[in-house]
Amino acid sequence: MILEVIATCAEDAVLAEAHGADRLELITAITEGGLTPGIGLVRQVVKSVKIPVHVMVRPHSRSFVYSEADIQTMEEEARAVEDAGAAGIVFGALTEERQIDEVALARILAAAGGMNVTFHRAFDELQDLSEGLRTLLKYPQVTRVLTSGGPLPAPQATSEIRQLVELAHGSSLVILAGYGLTLETVDRFITDTQVTEVHFGSDIRFGGKGLSPIDPDRLSALSSRLKLY
């Protein structure tokens, strides 16, 4: 079981690695769902940890429908993130019709070079999740989809996530479940969905608040529990 933890600063990253995270999603603006962090922070985190660092590439939080200027910005950010030594980017783009924007996707994949690419929770706004996953399966460079199985927290969408896991089975694409997972509910969730990767943010922070520091004890307890899978 792979545990991905959100990091918003270098201290988060070091703590997360020390207490059991297998991978980091590095972001800023956690209360807005995550935006692209400054390149200085990306470089610092990559230097500070040995686990893979995946960096959010999202220029604003207004929507996941992007203009030409937005796409050009994300292309530049993806290239800078690769140059900084990160292992991957986290990205998503939709059309006005709530389908995957394949034009934007192709351009960002080209800019991402050899990095891993996670399609983020823009996926959960799609009109048809199964159709969206089939679209992403056409792009081998997309190695995972971060999803809660729709607009609700992941524990309330176990059947939808299980369906996505089954659809992706046998491919190179992994379903990464996130949003609403807790230390107390993760065991039942894994059993019900058969996911192999989970994504944690607020629940492993003091008081369950996104702007609080990581709680080392809670993260260690989660990591220990996930080692049983």
Image (cartoon, rainbow, N blue to C red):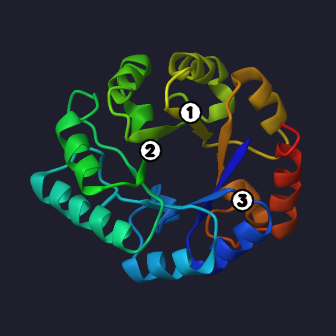
- Give the residue type at disc 3: Ala
Where, quadrant-wise, is the N terminus in this rendering? top right
Percent of width and height locating residue 12 = 65, 73
Q: Which residue carries the number 3 mark?
A: 21
Disc 1 or 3, which lies upstream in sequence? Answer: 3
Provide the secondary structure element on which disc 1 rests: strand
Give the Cα separation between the discs numbered 2 and 3: 19 Å
Image side of residue 140 versus residue 199, left or right: left
Q: Residue at x 39, y 77 (%)?
A: 38
Disc 2 or 3, which lies upstream in sequence? Answer: 3
Indicate which label's residue lies in the foreground, 2 or 3.
Answer: 3
Provide the secondary structure element on which disc 3 rests: loop
Where, quadrant-wise, is the C terminus in this rendering? top right
Up the image or down, 129 lies above or below 103; here it is above
Provide the secondary structure element on which disc 2 rests: loop
Q: Which residue carries the number 2 mark?
A: 120
